[in-house]
Amino acid sequence: MAEKILMNEFKALAKESWTNISLVNENIYDWSVALMVLNPDSAYYGGYFKARMAFPHNYPYQPPDFRFERPLWHPNVYPDGRLCISILHQPGEDVMSGESAGERWSPVQRVESVLISVLSLLDDAEVSSPANVDAGVMLRSDPAAYKERVMQDRERSKQDIPAGFVMPTHESAFKKEEPVVDEFSWSDSDAESFGASDSDEEMFDDEDEEVEAGSGAESEGEEEKEKGKEAR
């Protein structure tokens, strides 16, 4: 069951512009994932953040493992690239951490929900219980210096952009399709547009003449009958 679910999710995510995914050694349980922030106001905008996702064979009953290949300077990213994020924690309520079951992994979660949560976390760090204490302190005490470190990570991440890959932008990802305008005008139409032709009109004229002729013959026949009655 896990393989079928993962394959369906892989096919769906492969169509998204904000991520670039592939299988590692054709293994459906091992994914290479790249995340791209499409918010132009974000310090992460324009970066290509590669990660690995490993899935247990009893997925979706247990959460996947997510790890950035290039560790980021972020309060919720460990030095080895792992994340401190509730959605990747084991199912069920955790009294010690104060996390409710609704915040943690559950079988209704999917890869897409994990990746969206990670993207959200990048710009909305949780500093109350940081995985990287120094990054958490810098974010609170010197936001400008923190942003500078983030931008350095962003520029380094661009080294991982595959050759020939076109990076999405906010404009390209959210470009609206132009409506198709029908330039047809009734004034441009004529009888031929509806299948009519001169020969068709002549045919109708001939039919009208035949009808009139038939009506005239019937009238003459009626007059002859009346004359016959009077003669008797």
Image (spheres, rainbow, N blue to C red):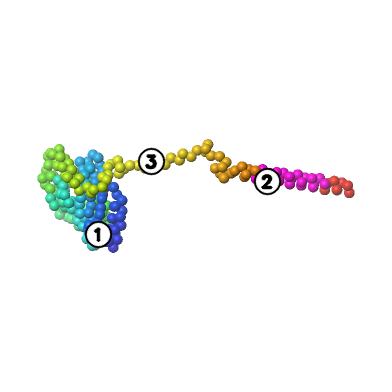
- Dot 3 or dot 2: first in sequence order is 3
Which kind of residue does numbered mark 1 sit on?
Glu
Please tell me whether mark 1 sits on a helix, a strand or a loop: loop
Residue at the spot x=16%, y=49% of the render? 70
Q: Which residue is mark 2?
A: 207
Q: Which residue is mark 3?
A: 178
Residue at the spot x=54%, y=42% of the render? 193
* Quadrant showing the N terminus: bottom left
Residue at the spot x=63%, y=43% of the render? 201
Task: Find residue 227 and report its horizontal and vertical position in percent.
Answer: 85, 46
Decide which of 110, 32 is in the foreground and name it: 32
Q: Which residue is mark 1?
A: 26
Mark 2 to mark 1: distance in Å? 75 Å
Task: Find residue 179 and report its horizontal and vertical position in percent.
Answer: 40, 41
Q: Residue furthest left?
A: 134
- Dot 3 or dot 1: first in sequence order is 1
Side (left or right) of 119 relative to 185: left
Q: Residue furthest right?
A: 232
Please tell me whether mark 2 sits on a helix, a strand or a loop: helix
Q: Quarter of the image holding residue 106?
A: bottom left
Task: Find residue 128 and report its horizontal and vertical position in percent.
Answer: 15, 46
Q: Quarter of the image holding residue 44?
A: top left
